[in-house]
């Protein structure tokens, strides 16, 4: 099977406005999705990402992230296994991020 990385993109300002109950419900949806992927032997890894971070270039260090040029930012990632791009796309389409208006960037992981 091939591995794919899903970058979760969402409006972080909107996410910070969620109530504790909404955040708990959101987290439960992700946990259920990961459980389903695990049962199907398609889950490799995944975690939410913290706010902030660093953008490093040869000549600069920027610390006022997230670092995308819109209100959307990468809020987490998953690494999944799939037999084809089409299967990976179908798995990605089941991600709970879509219920809150977010999106997913799907990239194949290069294998040696």
Image (cartoon, grey):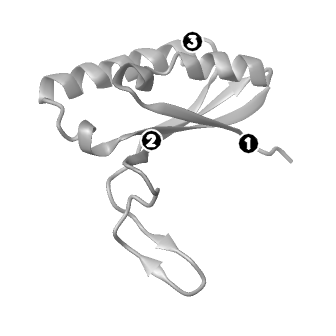
**Residue 26 sits in which quadrant?**
top left
Return the x and y of residue 110 as percentages of the image width and height.
79, 45
Q: Residues within 10 Å of mark 2 (few under 14, many from 20)?
A: some
Write down the residue under mark 1.
109
The residue tagged 2 is: 76
> Image height check: is 72 above or below 85?
below
Q: Are marks 1 and 2 in contact (CB under 8 Å)?
A: no
Left or right of 44 on screen, residue 18:
left
Under tag 1, what secondary structure?
A: loop
Above/below status of 54 relative to 35: below
The structure residue drawn at horizontal position 48% and vertical position 70%, both measured from the top left corner, is: 55
Q: Quadrant of residue 28?
A: top left
Q: Residues within 10 Å of mark 1 (few under 14, many from 20)?
A: few
Q: Which residue is mark 3?
A: 39
Q: Secondary structure at mark 2?
A: strand
Seen at 18% across and 32% down, the residue is 18
Q: Is the C-beta separation of discs 1 and 3 under 8 Å?
A: no
- The span from disc 1 to disc 2 (Cα, nearest Å) is 16 Å
Q: Position of residue 49 (x, y in %)?
A: 40, 48
Quadrant (top left, top right, bottom left, bottom right) of the N terminus:
top right
Q: What secondary structure is marked by label 3?
A: helix
Nearer to the camera, 112 or 50: 50
């Amino acid at each position: 099977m091939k591995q794919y990385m899903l970058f979760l993109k969402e409006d972080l300002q909107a996410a910070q406005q969620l109530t504790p109950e909404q955040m708990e419900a959101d987290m439960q949806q992700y946990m259920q999705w990961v459980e389903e992927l695990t049962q199907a032997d398609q889950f490799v890894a995944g975690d939410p990402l913290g706010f902030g971070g660093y953008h490093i270039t040869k000549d600069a260090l920027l610390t006022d992230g997230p670092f995308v040029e819109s209100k959307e930012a990468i809020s987490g990632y998953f690494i999944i296994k799939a037999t084809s791009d089409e299967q990976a796309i179908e798995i990605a389409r089941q991600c709970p991020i879509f219920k809150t208006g977010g999106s997913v960037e799907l990239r194949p992981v290069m294998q040696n």
